[in-house]
Image: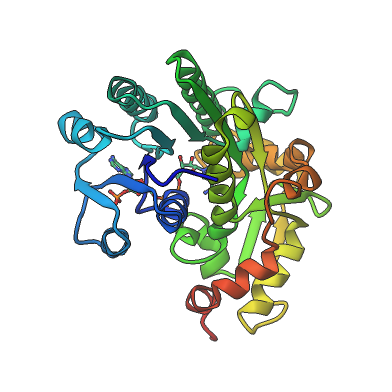
Amino acid sequence: MSSPEHSVFVCSATGFQGGAVARRAREIGWNVHATTRDLTSQPAMAMKSIGVHLNECDWDNLAVLRDTIQGCDKLFLCLTINWDDLSCELRQCRDILKIAKEAGVKQVVSSTTLGVSMLDSEIGVYPGSFMEKHMINKKAIEQAVEDCGFDHFTFLRPTFFMANFIEPKVSRYAEIRDKRSWTTSMTPETQLPIVDHEDIAKFAMSAFQDPVAFHGHAISLASDQLRVQEILDLLAEAAGQPGSVRAYFLTDEEVEAQASTSGFSDSHKVLRYASEYVDLEKLRATVQLTSFREYLERHLEAVRLTFPHP
Ligand SMILES: NC(=O)c1ccc[n+]([C@@H]2O[C@H](COP(=O)([O-])OP(=O)(O)OC[C@H]3O[C@@H](n4cnc5c(N)ncnc54)[C@H](OP(=O)(O)O)[C@@H]3O)[C@@H](O)[C@H]2O)c1
Protein backbone atom coordinates (compact mmCIF):
# COMPACT_ATOMS: atom_id res chain seq x y z
CA MET A 1 0.00 0.00 0.00
CA SER A 2 1.42 3.35 -0.96
CA SER A 3 1.91 5.99 1.64
CA PRO A 4 -0.06 9.17 1.00
CA GLU A 5 2.80 11.53 1.73
CA HIS A 6 4.69 11.04 -1.53
CA SER A 7 5.29 14.07 -3.71
CA VAL A 8 6.10 13.60 -7.36
CA PHE A 9 7.41 16.15 -9.83
CA VAL A 10 5.74 15.30 -13.13
CA CYS A 11 7.39 16.66 -16.27
CA SER A 12 4.87 17.41 -19.00
CA ALA A 13 1.85 17.20 -16.68
CA THR A 14 -0.07 19.26 -19.24
CA GLY A 15 0.80 16.70 -21.93
CA PHE A 16 -0.47 13.21 -22.66
CA GLN A 17 1.76 10.87 -20.65
CA GLY A 18 2.51 13.36 -17.88
CA GLY A 19 -1.16 14.29 -17.58
CA ALA A 20 -2.12 10.64 -17.16
CA VAL A 21 0.57 10.13 -14.50
CA ALA A 22 -0.46 13.30 -12.65
CA ARG A 23 -4.14 12.28 -12.59
CA ARG A 24 -3.33 8.79 -11.31
CA ALA A 25 -1.00 10.13 -8.63
CA ARG A 26 -3.65 12.60 -7.45
CA GLU A 27 -6.25 9.80 -7.39
CA ILE A 28 -4.24 8.04 -4.68
CA GLY A 29 -3.69 11.26 -2.80
CA TRP A 30 -0.08 12.01 -3.72
CA ASN A 31 1.12 15.58 -4.06
CA VAL A 32 1.89 16.42 -7.65
CA HIS A 33 4.20 19.29 -8.58
CA ALA A 34 4.52 20.41 -12.19
CA THR A 35 5.26 23.29 -14.53
CA THR A 36 3.60 24.71 -17.60
CA ARG A 37 4.55 27.56 -19.91
CA ASP A 38 0.96 28.84 -19.79
CA LEU A 39 -1.08 28.70 -16.60
CA THR A 40 -4.19 29.78 -18.51
CA SER A 41 -4.16 26.89 -21.01
CA GLN A 42 -6.95 24.31 -20.83
CA PRO A 43 -4.62 21.43 -19.76
CA ALA A 44 -3.05 23.67 -17.09
CA MET A 45 -6.48 24.61 -15.71
CA ALA A 46 -7.44 20.92 -15.69
CA MET A 47 -4.35 20.10 -13.65
CA LYS A 48 -5.04 22.97 -11.24
CA SER A 49 -8.59 21.71 -10.76
CA ILE A 50 -7.35 18.35 -9.45
CA GLY A 51 -4.96 19.98 -7.03
CA VAL A 52 -1.64 19.86 -8.91
CA HIS A 53 0.87 22.45 -7.62
CA LEU A 54 1.56 24.19 -10.89
CA ASN A 55 4.15 26.90 -11.58
CA GLU A 56 4.64 28.79 -14.82
CA CYS A 57 8.04 28.32 -16.42
CA ASP A 58 10.02 26.98 -19.33
CA TRP A 59 12.40 24.12 -18.45
CA ASP A 60 15.25 26.58 -19.03
CA ASN A 61 14.09 28.58 -16.00
CA LEU A 62 16.11 26.81 -13.33
CA ALA A 63 15.02 29.02 -10.44
CA VAL A 64 11.31 28.19 -10.85
CA LEU A 65 12.15 24.55 -11.54
CA ARG A 66 14.09 24.46 -8.25
CA ASP A 67 11.13 25.94 -6.36
CA THR A 68 8.73 23.45 -7.98
CA ILE A 69 10.80 20.31 -7.41
CA GLN A 70 11.56 21.25 -3.78
CA GLY A 71 9.95 18.74 -1.40
CA CYS A 72 9.47 16.00 -4.02
CA ASP A 73 10.77 12.47 -3.45
CA LYS A 74 9.84 11.14 -6.91
CA LEU A 75 10.32 12.34 -10.48
CA PHE A 76 8.48 11.38 -13.67
CA LEU A 77 10.92 12.44 -16.36
CA CYS A 78 9.30 13.02 -19.73
CA LEU A 79 10.79 15.68 -21.93
CA THR A 80 9.95 16.91 -25.39
CA ILE A 81 11.94 17.00 -28.59
CA ASN A 82 12.96 20.49 -29.64
CA TRP A 83 12.80 20.14 -33.42
CA ASP A 84 15.04 23.19 -33.94
CA ASP A 85 17.69 22.07 -31.47
CA LEU A 86 18.03 18.34 -30.80
CA SER A 87 20.58 19.00 -28.03
CA CYS A 88 17.98 20.91 -25.98
CA GLU A 89 16.20 17.83 -24.57
CA LEU A 90 19.36 16.32 -23.06
CA ARG A 91 20.49 19.66 -21.65
CA GLN A 92 17.11 20.22 -19.97
CA CYS A 93 17.15 16.63 -18.74
CA ARG A 94 20.54 17.12 -17.04
CA ASP A 95 19.33 20.37 -15.42
CA ILE A 96 16.19 18.72 -14.06
CA LEU A 97 18.11 15.68 -12.80
CA LYS A 98 20.67 17.87 -11.01
CA ILE A 99 17.94 19.92 -9.35
CA ALA A 100 16.00 16.76 -8.42
CA LYS A 101 19.07 15.17 -6.87
CA GLU A 102 19.83 18.31 -4.84
CA ALA A 103 16.18 18.45 -3.72
CA GLY A 104 16.36 14.92 -2.34
CA VAL A 105 14.43 13.00 -4.99
CA LYS A 106 14.96 9.28 -4.42
CA GLN A 107 13.23 7.64 -7.38
CA VAL A 108 13.03 8.48 -11.09
CA VAL A 109 10.73 6.93 -13.67
CA SER A 110 11.88 8.09 -17.07
CA SER A 111 9.81 7.70 -20.23
CA THR A 112 11.96 7.59 -23.36
CA THR A 113 11.12 5.53 -26.46
CA LEU A 114 11.06 1.98 -27.77
CA GLY A 115 13.81 3.20 -30.09
CA VAL A 116 16.32 2.84 -27.25
CA SER A 117 15.60 -0.90 -27.17
CA MET A 118 16.13 -1.02 -30.93
CA LEU A 119 19.18 1.20 -31.17
CA ASP A 120 21.86 -1.42 -30.69
CA SER A 121 20.28 -3.99 -32.98
CA GLU A 122 20.80 -4.46 -36.68
CA ILE A 123 17.55 -2.74 -37.59
CA GLY A 124 18.69 -0.52 -40.42
CA VAL A 125 18.39 2.93 -38.89
CA TYR A 126 19.83 5.24 -41.51
CA PRO A 127 23.06 6.78 -40.21
CA GLY A 128 22.53 10.49 -39.63
CA SER A 129 18.74 10.19 -39.97
CA PHE A 130 16.44 12.05 -37.63
CA MET A 131 15.41 8.71 -36.09
CA GLU A 132 18.99 7.78 -35.30
CA LYS A 133 19.69 11.14 -33.63
CA HIS A 134 16.43 10.87 -31.69
CA MET A 135 17.23 7.36 -30.43
CA ILE A 136 20.77 8.37 -29.42
CA ASN A 137 19.35 11.33 -27.51
CA LYS A 138 16.86 9.20 -25.61
CA LYS A 139 19.54 6.65 -24.78
CA ALA A 140 21.72 9.48 -23.43
CA ILE A 141 18.80 10.57 -21.24
CA GLU A 142 18.62 7.08 -19.74
CA GLN A 143 22.37 7.12 -19.16
CA ALA A 144 22.13 10.51 -17.45
CA VAL A 145 19.46 9.14 -15.08
CA GLU A 146 21.60 6.11 -14.28
CA ASP A 147 24.71 8.24 -13.70
CA CYS A 148 22.96 10.46 -11.16
CA GLY A 149 22.88 7.78 -8.47
CA PHE A 150 19.22 7.92 -7.44
CA ASP A 151 18.18 5.13 -5.06
CA HIS A 152 15.80 3.72 -7.68
CA PHE A 153 15.17 4.31 -11.36
CA THR A 154 13.06 2.71 -14.09
CA PHE A 155 12.94 3.30 -17.84
CA LEU A 156 9.68 3.11 -19.77
CA ARG A 157 10.18 2.83 -23.51
CA PRO A 158 6.84 3.46 -25.24
CA THR A 159 6.16 2.59 -28.85
CA PHE A 160 4.05 4.64 -31.31
CA PHE A 161 1.19 6.40 -29.48
CA MET A 162 -2.45 5.54 -30.25
CA ALA A 163 -2.99 9.27 -29.77
CA ASN A 164 -1.03 9.96 -32.99
CA PHE A 165 -4.09 8.92 -35.04
CA ILE A 166 -6.46 11.58 -33.69
CA GLU A 167 -6.56 15.28 -32.82
CA PRO A 168 -4.48 17.01 -31.62
CA LYS A 169 -1.44 14.76 -32.21
CA VAL A 170 -2.56 13.73 -35.71
CA SER A 171 -1.18 17.02 -37.02
CA ARG A 172 2.24 15.33 -37.16
CA TYR A 173 0.63 12.71 -39.45
CA ALA A 174 -1.63 15.14 -41.25
CA GLU A 175 -1.94 12.91 -44.33
CA ILE A 176 -4.10 10.52 -42.29
CA ARG A 177 -6.51 13.31 -41.36
CA ASP A 178 -6.40 15.40 -44.52
CA LYS A 179 -6.11 12.75 -47.24
CA ARG A 180 -7.45 9.74 -45.35
CA SER A 181 -4.34 7.81 -46.29
CA TRP A 182 -1.05 6.85 -44.68
CA THR A 183 1.97 6.47 -46.90
CA THR A 184 4.42 4.42 -44.91
CA SER A 185 7.67 2.53 -45.16
CA MET A 186 6.17 -0.28 -43.12
CA THR A 187 4.84 -3.27 -45.07
CA PRO A 188 1.33 -4.79 -45.33
CA GLU A 189 2.53 -7.56 -42.99
CA THR A 190 4.11 -5.27 -40.38
CA GLN A 191 2.60 -5.73 -36.95
CA LEU A 192 2.76 -2.25 -35.47
CA PRO A 193 2.77 -2.11 -31.66
CA ILE A 194 0.87 0.96 -30.42
CA VAL A 195 0.45 2.30 -26.92
CA ASP A 196 -2.22 4.09 -24.91
CA HIS A 197 -0.62 6.91 -22.87
CA GLU A 198 -2.87 5.83 -19.96
CA ASP A 199 -1.08 2.46 -20.00
CA ILE A 200 2.27 4.28 -19.79
CA ALA A 201 0.93 5.99 -16.68
CA LYS A 202 -0.23 2.66 -15.24
CA PHE A 203 3.34 1.35 -15.53
CA ALA A 204 4.79 4.56 -14.14
CA MET A 205 2.55 4.34 -11.08
CA SER A 206 3.31 0.63 -10.63
CA ALA A 207 7.02 1.49 -10.57
CA PHE A 208 6.51 4.44 -8.23
CA GLN A 209 4.58 2.23 -5.82
CA ASP A 210 7.14 -0.58 -5.87
CA PRO A 211 10.54 1.07 -6.41
CA VAL A 212 12.56 -1.98 -5.45
CA ALA A 213 10.83 -4.42 -7.80
CA PHE A 214 11.10 -2.03 -10.76
CA HIS A 215 14.58 -0.73 -10.02
CA GLY A 216 16.94 -0.85 -13.02
CA HIS A 217 14.28 -2.23 -15.35
CA ALA A 218 13.84 -0.94 -18.91
CA ILE A 219 10.36 -1.82 -20.13
CA SER A 220 9.41 -1.72 -23.81
CA LEU A 221 5.79 -0.57 -23.74
CA ALA A 222 2.86 -1.30 -26.02
CA SER A 223 -0.85 -1.83 -25.44
CA ASP A 224 -1.92 -3.53 -28.66
CA GLN A 225 -0.43 -4.71 -31.92
CA LEU A 226 -2.06 -4.69 -35.35
CA ARG A 227 -1.27 -4.50 -39.06
CA VAL A 228 -1.22 -0.93 -40.38
CA GLN A 229 -4.38 -1.38 -42.48
CA GLU A 230 -6.17 -3.00 -39.52
CA ILE A 231 -5.37 0.10 -37.44
CA LEU A 232 -6.73 2.39 -40.16
CA ASP A 233 -9.83 0.21 -40.56
CA LEU A 234 -10.62 0.49 -36.85
CA LEU A 235 -10.08 4.23 -37.04
CA ALA A 236 -12.41 4.62 -40.04
CA GLU A 237 -15.02 2.36 -38.41
CA ALA A 238 -14.95 4.43 -35.20
CA ALA A 239 -15.40 7.56 -37.32
CA GLY A 240 -18.51 5.98 -38.83
CA GLN A 241 -16.91 5.82 -42.29
CA PRO A 242 -15.76 2.20 -42.72
CA GLY A 243 -12.98 1.58 -45.22
CA SER A 244 -12.29 5.28 -45.77
CA VAL A 245 -8.66 5.40 -44.55
CA ARG A 246 -6.11 3.54 -46.67
CA ALA A 247 -2.47 2.58 -46.19
CA TYR A 248 0.02 3.00 -49.03
CA PHE A 249 3.20 1.01 -48.66
CA LEU A 250 6.39 2.44 -50.13
CA THR A 251 8.75 0.05 -51.86
CA ASP A 252 12.28 -0.30 -50.50
CA GLU A 253 13.50 1.72 -53.50
CA GLU A 254 11.08 4.54 -52.69
CA VAL A 255 12.13 4.50 -49.04
CA GLU A 256 15.78 4.61 -50.08
CA ALA A 257 15.11 7.56 -52.39
CA GLN A 258 13.57 9.51 -49.51
CA ALA A 259 16.23 8.59 -46.95
CA SER A 260 18.10 11.85 -47.35
CA THR A 261 15.00 14.03 -47.02
CA SER A 262 13.59 15.27 -43.74
CA GLY A 263 10.50 13.08 -44.10
CA PHE A 264 9.51 10.29 -41.76
CA SER A 265 9.62 7.43 -44.26
CA ASP A 266 13.15 6.27 -43.52
CA SER A 267 12.48 6.75 -39.82
CA HIS A 268 9.40 4.62 -39.95
CA LYS A 269 11.22 1.77 -41.63
CA VAL A 270 12.44 0.80 -38.17
CA LEU A 271 8.81 0.34 -37.15
CA ARG A 272 8.76 -2.78 -39.34
CA TYR A 273 10.69 -4.45 -36.56
CA ALA A 274 9.18 -2.77 -33.49
CA SER A 275 7.02 -5.78 -32.60
CA GLU A 276 10.16 -7.83 -31.98
CA TYR A 277 10.88 -5.63 -28.98
CA VAL A 278 7.58 -5.86 -27.11
CA ASP A 279 6.07 -8.75 -25.19
CA LEU A 280 2.37 -8.02 -24.75
CA GLU A 281 1.74 -11.12 -22.65
CA LYS A 282 4.45 -10.14 -20.18
CA LEU A 283 3.15 -6.57 -20.04
CA ARG A 284 -0.39 -7.83 -19.40
CA ALA A 285 0.89 -9.66 -16.34
CA THR A 286 1.66 -6.25 -14.78
CA VAL A 287 -1.20 -3.99 -15.88
CA GLN A 288 -4.43 -4.25 -17.82
CA LEU A 289 -3.64 -3.13 -21.37
CA THR A 290 -6.00 -1.12 -23.56
CA SER A 291 -6.92 -2.41 -27.02
CA PHE A 292 -7.02 0.11 -29.89
CA ARG A 293 -10.77 -0.49 -30.18
CA GLU A 294 -11.21 0.42 -26.51
CA TYR A 295 -8.98 3.46 -26.96
CA LEU A 296 -11.07 4.73 -29.87
CA GLU A 297 -14.29 4.19 -27.92
CA ARG A 298 -12.85 6.27 -25.08
CA HIS A 299 -11.90 9.05 -27.51
CA LEU A 300 -14.89 8.94 -29.83
CA GLU A 301 -15.38 12.69 -29.75
CA ALA A 302 -11.77 13.32 -30.89
CA VAL A 303 -12.12 10.61 -33.56
CA ARG A 304 -15.21 12.32 -35.01
CA LEU A 305 -13.52 15.72 -34.82
CA THR A 306 -10.51 14.33 -36.70
CA PHE A 307 -12.61 12.64 -39.40
CA PRO A 308 -15.76 14.70 -39.96
CA HIS A 309 -18.18 13.29 -42.52
CA PRO A 310 -17.37 14.84 -45.92
N1 LIG B 1 4.13 10.27 -30.02
C1 LIG B 1 4.72 9.10 -30.01
O1 LIG B 1 4.39 8.18 -30.77
C2 LIG B 1 5.86 8.87 -29.04
C3 LIG B 1 6.39 7.59 -28.91
C4 LIG B 1 7.43 7.37 -27.99
C5 LIG B 1 7.92 8.43 -27.24
N2 LIG B 1 7.39 9.68 -27.39
C6 LIG B 1 7.95 10.79 -26.60
O2 LIG B 1 6.94 11.39 -25.82
C7 LIG B 1 7.41 12.68 -25.43
C8 LIG B 1 6.23 13.63 -25.38
O3 LIG B 1 5.26 13.14 -24.50
P1 LIG B 1 3.75 13.53 -24.69
O4 LIG B 1 3.36 13.28 -26.12
O5 LIG B 1 2.99 12.89 -23.61
O6 LIG B 1 3.82 15.11 -24.47
P2 LIG B 1 2.88 16.19 -25.16
O7 LIG B 1 1.47 15.77 -25.07
O8 LIG B 1 3.44 16.52 -26.51
O9 LIG B 1 3.10 17.44 -24.22
C9 LIG B 1 4.29 18.17 -24.22
C10 LIG B 1 4.55 18.65 -22.80
O10 LIG B 1 5.84 19.23 -22.72
C11 LIG B 1 5.75 20.50 -22.10
N3 LIG B 1 6.82 21.31 -22.67
C12 LIG B 1 7.24 21.30 -23.97
N4 LIG B 1 8.28 22.12 -24.12
C13 LIG B 1 8.53 22.66 -22.91
C14 LIG B 1 9.49 23.58 -22.43
N5 LIG B 1 10.41 24.12 -23.24
N6 LIG B 1 9.47 23.92 -21.14
C15 LIG B 1 8.54 23.39 -20.32
N7 LIG B 1 7.60 22.51 -20.71
C16 LIG B 1 7.60 22.15 -21.99
C17 LIG B 1 4.35 20.98 -22.41
O11 LIG B 1 3.95 21.87 -21.41
P3 LIG B 1 3.21 23.30 -21.69
O12 LIG B 1 2.84 23.33 -23.15
O13 LIG B 1 2.03 23.30 -20.77
O14 LIG B 1 4.23 24.31 -21.32
C18 LIG B 1 3.56 19.68 -22.32
O15 LIG B 1 3.24 19.38 -20.98
C19 LIG B 1 8.48 13.08 -26.45
O16 LIG B 1 9.71 13.18 -25.81
C20 LIG B 1 8.49 11.93 -27.45
O17 LIG B 1 9.78 11.65 -27.90
C21 LIG B 1 6.36 9.92 -28.27
**In the picture, which quadrant includes the N terminus?**
top right
Colouring rule applied to residues: rainbow
Compared to residue 234, the image places residue 78 above or below, namely: above
**Residue under the image location 46 percent in, 50 percent down:** 21
User: Which residue sits at x=49%, y=33%?
Assistant: 110
Q: Is residue 125 visible?
A: no
Residue 112: horizontal and vertical position, in percent?
52, 35
Q: Nearer the viewer, residue 141 or 238?
A: 141
Q: Can residue 61 be spotted in the picture?
A: yes
Q: Would you say 29 lies left or right of 301 here? A: left
Q: Nearer the viewer, residue 133 or 76?
A: 76
- Give the image location of residue 220, x and y in percent: 67, 37
Left or right: residue 187 versus residue 32 is: right
- x, y percent for residue 102: 28, 20
* Above-or-below relation of 289 to 57: below
* Residue positioned most to the left: 63
The answer to whether residue 39 is left or right of residue 46 is left
* Image vertical order of residue 117 relative to residue 149, above or below: below
Name, please, the residue furthest toward the right.
Answer: 189
Q: Who's the residue at 24% across and 32% down the image?
A: 70
Which residue shows up at 37% across the image and 46% down it? 12
Image-based side of 180 in relation to 12, left or right = right
How many marks are shown on the rendered structure?
A: 0
**Front residue (pair 172, 151):** 151
Of 26 and 85, nearer the camera is 26
Q: Position of residue 260 (x, y in %)?
A: 56, 32
